[in-house]
């Protein structure tokens, strides 16, 4: 895939896309955007704190005649490790300021306090006891060093305008993928630094985080409509190629989730019951794969995604939910 090739790619005057590698990850790379700001740089997202990613970023900065000391600030769209943790690692060495959305505070605190069971209770409530047992073992295998990649940012971002030397970036909270996700809008240059909120080829996961909100899909749909209310912008995503129309992709994502809600409702009407049982009835990925073909991580994601869709259907009055022995059981209203 061309967009995963290493290098430095100018996507707008003074804005450079730098793809950084991800390990054993279906996403392949994460796009970091380096914005020229006077005699320094501001980076949107940072990458994963891995030696290969750090070397790739250092090489890319060198091609721009810069180095790590020239980074004035990291503006991070959300706390997932492929976006946040390299910013923390570089701050420890260079003192670079790191900013993150205020809505990430609850999840950050759980990570820092080593509360590592954020998904276990959810999986049990969703009827995925078998998945919960396997997930617990996977979580226990995560090393302490990986947890130490996290520290709180220097700055918690809310909706505001950030004045750089040559441009203004509007911070828009866009909860959904995570509860504290933010995007950055350069209205004058018609640019949307979208993080994982709007991706050109895939639909981002919803609510996979230590402190899951009550209605993550509802939040996500509202956030898509918020971005859609802005003029059509050049889409600078964290994964995938740069594209020319944020509106076109937002419209596709909204339509996709309506179709997914219809399919989820049909599964419930067939008598599925729990979120886990419903997820097993649905197809997954663009290849429409069976649930049992997915690996553990993606089964957990799929179960959480299904629960998110079910809860929107409950909110719309199309489905009802009842807790039975600590498990949410859904039925058509």
Image: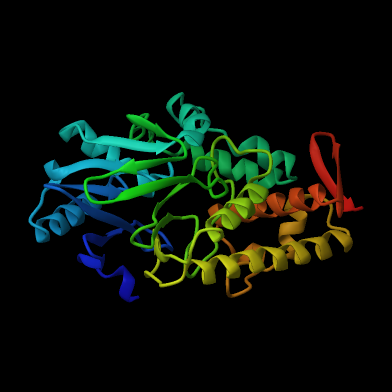
In the image, taking residue 65 as reference, residue 15 lies left or right, namely right
- The reply, left or right, for residue 100 in relation to residue 323 is left
The x and y percentages for residue 161 are 39, 42
With 15 as the anchor, is 141 left or right in this view?
A: right
The percent coordinates of residue 238 (x first, y second) are 39, 58
- Residue for point 46% across, 71% down: 245
Residue in the foreground of this view, choosing between 265 and 153: 153
Colouring of the image: rainbow
Please identify the residue farthest to the top as the structure is shown: 113
Give me the residue at 52% from left, 68% from top: 247
Would you identify the image quadrant in which residue 79 lies?
Answer: top left
Residue drawn at the location 29% of the way across and 42% of the way down = 74
Which corner quadrant holds the N terminus? bottom left
Task: Identify the residue at horizontal 59%, vertical 65% (top origin).
Answer: 253
Using the image, determine if residue 228 lies above or below residue 164. below
Foreground of the two, 124 or 286 = 286
The image quarter in which residue 164 lies: top left
The answer to whether 245 is drawn above or below residue 149 in the figure is: below
């Amino acid at each position: 895939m061309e967009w995963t090739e290493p290098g430095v790619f100018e996507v707008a005057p003074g804005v450079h896309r730098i793809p950084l590698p991800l390990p054993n990850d279906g996403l392949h790379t994460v796009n970091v955007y380096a914005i020229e700001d006077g005699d320094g740089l501001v980076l949107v997202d940072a990458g994963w704190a891995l030696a290969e990613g750090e070397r790739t970023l250092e090489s890319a900065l060198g091609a721009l005649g810069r180095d790590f000391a020239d980074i004035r600030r990291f503006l991070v769209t959300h706390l997932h490790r492929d976006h946040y943790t390299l910013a923390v690692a570089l701050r420890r060495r260079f003192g670079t300021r790191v900013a993150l959305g205020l809505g990430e505070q609850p999840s950050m605190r759980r990570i820092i306090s080593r509360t590592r069971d954020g998904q276990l209770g959810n999986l049990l409530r969703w009827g995925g006891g078998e998945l919960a047992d396997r997930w617990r073992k996977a979580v226990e295998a995560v090393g302490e060093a990986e947890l130490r990649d996290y520290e709180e940012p220097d700055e918690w971002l809310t909706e505001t305008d950030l004045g750089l030397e040559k441009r203004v970036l509007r911070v828009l909270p866009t909860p959904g993928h995570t509860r504290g996700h933010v995007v950055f809008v350069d209205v004058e240059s018609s640019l949307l630094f979208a993080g994982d909120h709007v991706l050109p080829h895939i639909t981002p996961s919803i609510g996979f985080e230590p402190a899951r909100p009550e209605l993550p899909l509802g939040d996500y749909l509202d956030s898509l409509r918020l971005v859609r209310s802005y003029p059509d912008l050049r889409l600078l995503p964290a994964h995938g190629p740069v594209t020319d129309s944020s509106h076109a992709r937002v419209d596709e994502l909204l339509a996709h989730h309506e179709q997914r809600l219809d399919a989820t409702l049909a599964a419930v009407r067939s008598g599925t019951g729990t979120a886990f049982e419903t997820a097993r009835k649905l197809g997954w990925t663009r290849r429409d794969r069976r649930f049992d073909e997915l690996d553990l991580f993606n089964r957990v994601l799929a179960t959480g995604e299904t629960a998110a869709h079910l809860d929107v259907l409950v909110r719309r009055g199309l489905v009802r939910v009842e807790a039975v022995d600590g498990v949410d059981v859904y039925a058509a209203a």
